[in-house]
């Protein structure tokens, strides 16, 4: 879905095993940037940074691609949290509702 964060557009996805997945989420699962661990989502943040689309095209993740293979490489998302791919963050539903505005027609 599209949302606005700090006055700028952002692509976000509510973490769920059953809701609709945008194309970038499907691609991230195919590339193993996103992986379910029971009811938690493991997120390879370096795969989503700086751009999932660019990383998928060039395979520029990990040390071979010049990426950073170190601390904060993985994040953990819980059901109901939001993954903001534009700003490379996982946000709780409570914070999402306070900090983001959903764009209904996008």
Image (cartoon, helix red, strand yellow):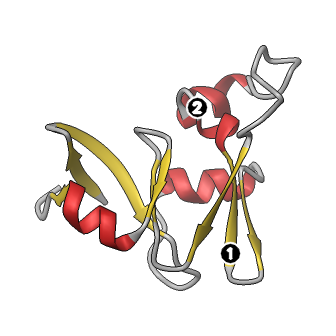
The residue at 76%/28% (across/down) is 61
What residue did someone put label 2 on?
A: 49
Image point (30%, 44%), residue name: 10
Q: Is residue 26 above or below residue 62?
A: below
Q: Secondary structure at mark 1?
A: strand
Left or right: residue 11 versus residue 22 is left
From the top left corner, tell me how far across and down residue 92 is, in percent.
42, 67
Q: Residue at x 59, y 59 (%)?
A: 26
Q: Nearer the viewer, residue 16 or 20?
A: 16
The quarter of the rendered structure image containing the C terminus is: bottom left
Element under disc 2: loop
* CA separation in Å, label 1 and label 2: 20 Å
- The answer to which quarter of the image holds residue 49 is top right
Number of marks drawn: 2
Which one is in front, 86 or 92? 92
User: Depth check: 18 or 68 in front?
Assistant: 68
**What is the residue that sits farthest to the right in this orientation?**
64
Within 10 angstroms of label 1, few (less than 14), some, or many (20 or more) residues? some
Q: Earlier in the sequence, mark 1 or mark 2?
A: 1
Q: Is residue 99 left or right of residue 88?
A: left
Image vertical order of residue 10 relative to residue 66, above or below: below
The answer to whether residue 50 is left or right of residue 39 is left
Q: Is residue 4 left or right of residue 52?
A: left
- Indicate the position of residue 105 as horizontal and vertical percent values: 11, 60
- Measured as percent of width and height from the top left, residue 22 is found at 45, 60
Q: Which image quadrant for residue 1? A: bottom left
Q: Compared to 31, does 59 lie above or below?
A: above
Q: Looking at the rendered structure, which numbered label has been put on residue 63?
A: none
Q: Which residue bears the numbered disc 1?
A: 40
């Amino acid at each position: 879905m599209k949302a606005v964060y700090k006055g700028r557009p952002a692509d976000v996805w509510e973490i769920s095993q059953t809701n609709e997945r945008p194309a970038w989420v499907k691609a991230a699962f195919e590339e193993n940037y996103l992986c379910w661990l029971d009811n938690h989502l493991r997120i390879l943040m370096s795969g989503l940074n700086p751009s999932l689309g660019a990383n998928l095209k060039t395979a520029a993740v990990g040390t071979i691609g010049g990426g950073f293979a170190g601390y904060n490489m993985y994040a953990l998302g819980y059901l109901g949290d939001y993954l903001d791919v534009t700003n490379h963050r996982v946000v709780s539903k409570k914070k999402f509702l306070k900090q983001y505005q959903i764009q209904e027609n996008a």
